[in-house]
Image (cartoon, helix red, strand yellow):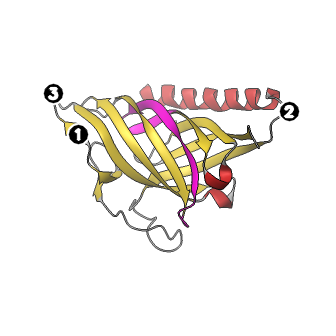
Amino acid sequence: MRRRRARVSVLLSVLLLVLVVPSASAKAERTDYSAFQFPMGFPGTVGPPLGYPACPGAYVTTPFPACVVAPGSVTRPGNGRWTIRDMGTLDGVLATSDPGLVGYQTATLNANLDASGNGPAWGTFTTYTFANEPLFSGTWNGTFENARLGGHFVGKGLGAHAGLHITGNLLMVDIPGVGTAIGVIKRTGP
């Protein structure tokens, strides 16, 4: 039942994005954005053919797969629950819409999870190219369901990308630790 509800929720989100996107203002330049995200060190992503580096921190699988580069505060208040604050993670970003947006992302993670890996989550992110050029910085929030994250993100362009604004959704997929992001990049300034 939960899986069906999650799939219906994803389909409704995509349908809403498809319906709302064409009605956006023609004044701003806009580009559709889509990407896969996964923890650095995720099986099958290190070395050829994708060429992503291994996790430079601790690769963990519980309560969900993550490359942890700053442990933050993780407490287990009982009954299998997890309280996570300011955990620093490192993710690979494989943008399918624009090869110039391929690279990595640092993020802070805060979450209150039950024993099944369900609960609210929120934090910040900064994305970079592999040449360490900053792309975007912003915030995200969402919900973990069975260690899979779904939610929303919003950010602004950095460096050469100043004046760009990115918004979108994090969609749950059936592989814990892997996500799909879809959204829009708009030019809001010079």
- Residue bearing the label numbered 2: 26
Element type at mark 2 = loop
Which of the two labelled residues, at mark 1 and mark 3, occupies the earlier sequence position?
Answer: 1
Q: Is 6 placed left or right of 19 in the picture?
A: left
Cα distance between the residues tagged 3 and 2: 52 Å
* Disc 1: which residue: 73
Across and down, in percent, residue 69 comes to 32, 55
Asked if 26 appears above or below 187 in the picture, the reply is above
Asked whether the beta carbons under mark 2 and mark 1 sit within 8 Å of each other, the answer is no
Going 80% across and 41% down the picture, which residue do you hit? 29
Q: Which residue sits furthest right?
A: 26
The residue depicted at 27 percent of the width and 58 percent of the height is: 58
**Are the residues tagged 3 and 2 within 8 Å (C-beta)?**
no
Q: Does residue 143 lie above or below 128 as drawn?
A: above
Residue for badge 3: 79
- Quarter placement of the C terminus: top right
Relative to the observer, which residue lies in front, 170 or 25? 25
- Using residue 26 as the reference point, say whether residue 110 is left or right of it: left
Tag 1, which secondary structure?
strand
Q: Residues within 10 Å of mark 2 (few under 14, many from 20)?
A: few
- Residue 93 on image: x %, y %: 53, 55
Q: Amino acid at mark 3?
A: Asn
Q: Amino acid at mark 2?
A: Ala
Q: Quadrant of residue 185?
A: top right
Taking the image as shown, residue 173 lies to the left or right of residue 136, namely left
Q: Which mark is residue 95?
A: none
Which mark is nearer the camera, 1 or 3? 1
Q: Residues within 10 Å of mark 1 (few under 14, many from 20)?
A: few
The magenta segment: 130-151
Q: Position of residue 74 (x, y in %)?
A: 22, 39
Could one spot residue 64 in this view of the protein? Answer: no
